Amino acid sequence: MSRFRWLTAGESHGPGLTMIVEGMPAGVILDEDIIQADLARRQGGYGRGARQAIEHDHAFLRSGVRHGRTMGSPIGMTLDNRDFQNANWQVRMAVEAIEQEVERVTLLRPGHADLAGTQKYGFDDVRPILERSSARETAARVAVGAIARALIREIGIEVHSHTVQLGEIRANVPDHIDWAAVDASPMRVADKAIEQAMIDEVDRTREGLDTVGGVFEVRATGVPFGLGSHVHWDRKLDGLLAQAIMSINAVKAVDIGDGVAGAAKRGSQVQDVIMPASAWERRTWEHMSNHAGGLEAGMTNGEDIVIRGFLKPISTVPQRMPTADLLTGEETMSFYERSDTAVVPAGGVVGEAMVAIVLADAVLQKFGGDHVDEIRRNFESFVATVGPRERP
């Protein structure tokens, strides 16, 4: 059974990030420009911090691609951290042993991996924990997600995202979203009427030396029936997607379809009525609504996948917070390096990558083959079987 497998390595201020992707079939169009487009989208969005002015992310393809197409072998990528060129970081994050003493970070930051990580791994310095737990790693995910996107696009699946809430400001989501306009928006919001209010909220938050959270929504269109499975808990696609979104830094809740709002309704209000063949317009088997977010019993049901990630305000606030010292346990104030004010627009791009990765794996399990042409044939053969079981 084919699988989409991937690994990332690297630290926030180390030499760079490394990505390995296995399972991509041969013949898929792929080059660095395709990956670069998504990396640039991740670095955008109103509310980002100074790090984005330093880094100009570019993933270099090192293996698995020849003449602009995948070869079926593992794909290797590297992404340099320009910030590492600073002499201080070359000492602090040196790979080789060094003779000079490096100042330890012992002031624990609330809301971070600092305390749990140092206790788990036995460190007397927070640096080894904060470097890997940093959201810098999401750049690697976006690069991998671009590869996954190239694969699922071969059978017509597209993945997009937009901001639906910043702080207490909620967008009114239109029935039809102009995705090009969303990407052109500094807040990546489809509701132009509240865009400036979101920008103003970011400005007020920055002036108050604080951070603000929000909600992004990811939508996958063109998704066929039957990805995922109902037979075991770890094959249910909604569970896999929820885990993928939940794994993104600062995400503390996940919502699929009506999700939380649906929990307050009657069952009759959240049913997606199956329409008769005489009413089908877009494809075989259609629903009158999509309260389930495209997923029923762990499987795709032909409708768009709709999933949301709820981002807490990031914990790296531009003011020192009460905490304790790692070495002594005594009361002190946390340290501050730098941070974003709002990451919701960028969070949506990371969410797209994670959804694309999960869907790529599901596509390979359902339609897998060694060449993309074989996957297309398998997909088309399956699609031909979808419909009423007793056809005239």
Image (spheres, rainbow, N blue to C red):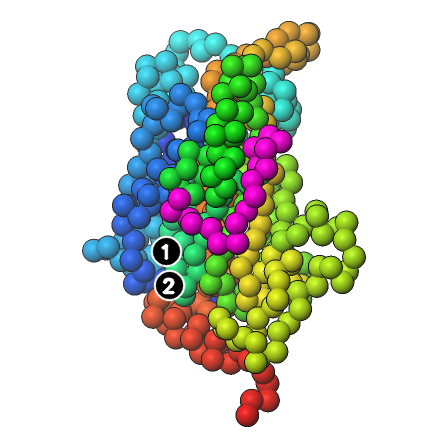
Report the front residue among 105 and 282: 282
Which residue occupies 31% across, 20% down?
A: 85
In this rendering, position of residue 53 left or right of residue 299: left
Report the front residue among 239 and 189: 189
Q: Quadrant of residue 186?
A: top left
Which residue occupies 50% across, 73% down?
A: 281
Res 160 seen here: yes
Percent x, y of residue 128:
51, 24
Percent x, y of residue 90:
35, 18
Q: In this picture, is 81 found above or below 283?
A: above
In this rendering, position of residue 181 left or right of residue 71: right
Magenta stretch containing residue 3, yes or no? no
Q: In this picture, is 94 found above or below 151?
A: above
Q: Quadrant of the C terminus?
A: bottom right
Mark 1 falls on what kind of element? helix
Q: Amino acid at mark 1?
A: Ala
Res 318 seen here: no
Q: Are marks 1 and 2 in contact (CB under 8 Å)?
A: yes
* Dot 1 alpha-carbon crowd within 10 angstroms: few under 14, some 14 to 19, many 20 or more: many
* Measured Cα–Cα span from mark 1 to mark 2: 7 Å
Q: Amino acid at mark 2?
A: Glu
Residue 154 got which mark? 2
Residue 39 got which mark? none
Mark 2 falls on what kind of element? helix
Residue annotated with mark 1: 150
Percent x, y of residue 276:
61, 78
Pick out the residue farthest to the front: 193
- The stretch in magenta equals 165-181
Report the front residue among 21 and 250: 250
Pick out the residue farthest to the left: 67
